[in-house]
Image (spheres, coloured by chain):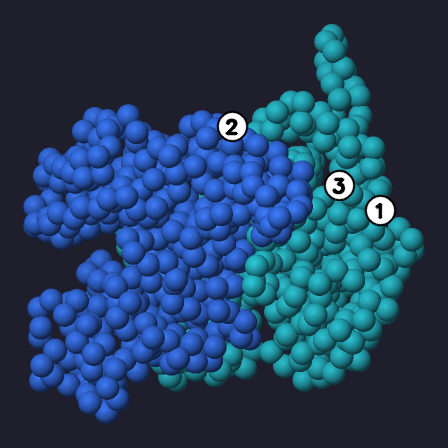
Chain colours: A cyan, B blue
Amino acid sequence: MTTPRRTSRDIRSESRLDVLHAVLVAGETTRNEVTRVTGLSPSTVATVVGELITEGIVAETKRTAGRVGRPTATLTMNAARGRVVGIDVAETYVRAVLFDAALHQVASVEEPRDEHVLDPGTVLDGIAGALDHVLEQGGVTRDDVLGVGISLPGLVRGTSGTSVVVPHWTWHRVELERLRERVGLPLIVDNPLKVMATAELWLGRGRYCSSMVTINLGTGVGAGIVLEGRILRGATNSAGEWGHSLLVLDGRECRCGRHGCVEAYVGAPGIQQTLREIQPAHPLADLAMQRDVIEAMAEAAARPGADPAVERTIERTAYYLGSALADLVAVINPEVVTLTGWTTWALGEHLLPATRARLVDQAPGRSADDVRLEVSTVRGNMVATGVAAIALERFLTDVGLLTTRIPITL
Amino acid sequence: MTTPRRTSRDIRSESRLDVLHAVLVAGETTRNEVTRVTGLSPSTVATVVGELITEGIVAETKRTAGRVGRPTATLTMNAARGRVVGIDVAETYVRAVLFDAALHQVASVEEPRDEHVLDPGTVLDGIAGALDHVLEQGGVTRDDVLGVGISLPGLVRGTSGTSVVVPHWTWHRVELERLRERVGLPLIVDNPLKVMATAELWLGRGRYCSSMVTINLGTGVGAGIVLEGRILRGATNSAGEWGHSLLVLDGRECRCGRHGCVEAYVGAPGIQQTLREIQPAHPLADLAMQRDVIEAMAEAAARPGADPAVERTIERTAYYLGSALADLVAVINPEVVTLTGWTTWALGEHLLPATRARLVDQAPGRSADDVRLEVSTVRGNMVATGVAAIALERFLTDVGLLTTRIPITL
Ligand SMILES: [Zn+2]
Ligand SMILES: [Zn+2]
C-alpha cells in the first residue's frame, strides 16, 4: 500500500546528461558554451566535464585560437570510446545501425521480415542476424560494443523487464532471456514512441524546451511525452498511447479493437479511409501499400488543383489531427509539439498550416497560442538513433555516471 | 531559443516536503515511522525533522512508552505556528476557511455571489469581505496569518503572475495588484484543478503513489495530474484540462465553445442532457438547479427499479466517463485515478462499477488492469484545503525550506 515516491532521479545525474547532450549536439564546443547552453554553473560544468573526460566519454583538444591569446580547450564526444548499435524491429523489416560513441552512423543493414511470422524464434533470428551483419559491415568486434538497443513495436512492461506486449505477440521472461543470450551484449529494449522521443530529446527540439510531445505518424500513431528533460513512461511504461485515445466515441473501428481512436483517422490506413469516404472510386482508394498511397497523395498535393479529392482528404486529416492534438495540449500543455514518422516526411508540410489553425482554435483557453507545432528536424533512422541513445545511456549508468529508469535492461 | 531546462526542483526540498506530508497525514508520528513511510534514509529524516523543528513547523514531544524502555520522541505539526486561509471563489459563492498550521479547520464562512456580476471590484470585495469575516470568526489577527491561498475558477497563466483567465473575466497585473493590496498578506492564486490535486496529494491517495490523476466532476469537469509527487502544471499552467478534450468529434456543444468535449457529457448539465435524450418528458429533464437534478438522480438510483430512465442515464454516463478516463490512462498511464467533486459525492458509488469496467476494456493494451479507480477520501472543503496547503507551501518557500513552482504568488 505504501509506495514511497522517491525516484532515482538525482541532480548530479541530470547535470551529466545535460552536459553530454550539449557536447553531443554541438559536435565541438567549449566549457563556456556548455555553461551557457545548459544553464548550469561554471563549476558544475567543470566538474562534470572532468568526470566525462576521465571515463573517456568526452575528449578534450587544447589549441590556440588566432595568433595571440590563451589556448582554448575544445570538447568533443570521444567517438573512439566504443560502438553502440540501435535495432529497429518493425512489422516488415529489421534495421540495425552501428554508431560510434558520438552517435554518428558507421554502418547500417536492413533485412526484410515476414510480418506474418511472429514466433519468438524467428524474430530472434532476425534480430541476431541483423546485429551480426552490421558489426561485420562496420568491421567491428563484439568487444568494441558498449551496448545494444532494440526497439520493439509494442508496450514494454515492467521496470525490471517482465514482458513485451506487441499486438500479436507477448514475450515474457523466457523470450527476453533468450534474446539476451542471442545478443550476448549489454542490452535494453524499449518502445518506438519512447525511442523517437529520446531522439528528439537528445538531437532535436527537446534540447531547447522543458516540455515537448513528439507525434509519430505512420501506420500507427502515438506520442512520446517529455517533461523536464525526461520521457514520461507512466506506471506501466505505456504513457503516450494517444493514438488509441478517442477522437470519435463509437467511431471507426481501430486495429486495437477500440472504436474511434485517433489512429483510425490519422494513421496511414485511416487517411486512406478518409479518401475512400470522399471519393470511393479514387485510384488510390484501394491501393494495397500504405506508403504508396501516402506518397502518391503528397505528389498530388504538390500540384494544387490537380486532385481535389486528395486535397479534401488532407484538409480533413488536418481537421482530425488538429482536434486530436488539441486534446493533448489540453491535458499536457507542452511548449512544443513535433511531428515525425514517414507520413510526416511525405505529407507534413501539406498538413501543417490547417492542423495548426485547428489546434489553436480547439485548445482550451489560449493554451495553444504559444505552442510550437513543427516538423521534427531529426531525420535518418530516428528509431535506431533513439534506441542507440538509450543504450548509450545504459552504458553511462553502468559506469556510474547516470541514474536512470530504463524499462528493460538485460 | 535556448531555454535551459533546469528546474528549481531539488532533492532537499523534496525530502522536506515528503517529511512534512508524512507528519501532516499521520497527525502524530515518529522519526522511524516517517523513515518507513517516505523511503528516505534515517539520517535524511533526522536532518529534515531538525530543520522543520527549528522553523517551528513541526513540534516534538518526548515521552516514555510503557513502564520501561527509552523515551520516544513524538512528532506532530506545530499547529500553533500560525494560521492559513484558503478561499474558494466559485461562480455562486465565496467560501473562506481558516486553518491552523496543521491544516485543521478553525473557522469557515460562505458568502453568496451574484454569478452575473463579474467586475473585478465586486469580486475583490467578495474575497476581502470573506477573509475579514473568517478572521473575525476565528478570533485571529492578520499578524497570525502565514499566508492566504485563493482558488479562482479559471486558468492562472504565467509563473510570475501575468494573468488569470476565467471564462467571463480576464484579470491582468492591474487586478492582481489590487487583489494583493486588498488582502495585504502573502498570497497565492491557483486554479481549482491544481488545488484539488494538491489536497489529494497532501491528504489523500497522492501520498501512496508516484502518479495519480484526480478527476473533478461537478458543473465543470477537469483533471489534476500528479507525477512523482508534483502537480503537472504545463507550459502555461493549463495542464489537466481534460474536461475540454474530445469525447465525440463534432458532438454536443460545450460551454467552452468547442464541440464534443468530455464536460458536455459528464459535467452535471451534460448528465441532465443525457437524461433528456433518454426520456424527454422526465420530471428531472428540465429542472433548473443542477445540484437538485444530480441529488434526485442519486436518490432514485438508490432504489433499483424505481426509475429506469435514471438508471439508463447513469449507465450511459459511466460509459462516457469510462471511455474518457481510458484516454487519460492511455496518455498519462497513472497508478491511481480518484474521483471528486459534488457529482461524485452524489453519484460516485453508482457510477463506479460500470465506469471501471469500461475503463479496463477501453484502455490500450492492459494499461488499465492495474489502475486503481476510486472515490477520493478527502472530504470537506477540498478546494479551500488544497489552496491553503499551497499557501502553506509558499510560506515554507519564503522561510527557505522549499523550492517550488507556484504559479502566482503576490
Ligand atoms: Zn485504437
Ligand atoms: Zn469544452
Q: Is mark 2 within 8 Å of ligand 2?
A: no
- The answer to whether the residues at label 2 and label 3 have Cβ atoms under 8 Å apart is no
Q: Are marks 1 and 3 on the same chain?
A: yes
- Please provide percent x and percent y for residue B6: 55, 35
Can I make out residue B172 in this image? yes
Residue drawn at x 77%, y 28% as measured from the top left: A50
- Please provide percent x and percent y for residue B8: 51, 34
> Residue B70 lies in what quarter of the image?
top right
Identify the chain of the residue marked 2, using the numbered disc in the image. B
Residue drawn at x 68%, y 56% as measured from the top left: A406
Residue drawn at x 91%, y 53% as measured from the top left: A143
Relative horizontal placement of residue A225, taking residue A182 as reference (left or right): left
Relative horizontal placement of residue A384, taking residue A258 as reference (left or right): right
Question: Which image quarter holds the C terminus of chain B?
Answer: top left
**Residue that label 2 marks:** B54
> Residue B380 lies in what quarter of the image?
bottom left
Q: CA distance from mark 2 to mark 3?
A: 36 Å
**Residue that label 1 marks:** A82
Q: Is mark 3 within 8 Å of ligand 1?
A: no
Indicate the amino acid at tag 1: Gly
Q: CA distance from mark 1 to mark 3?
A: 16 Å
Indicate the amino acid at tag 2: Thr
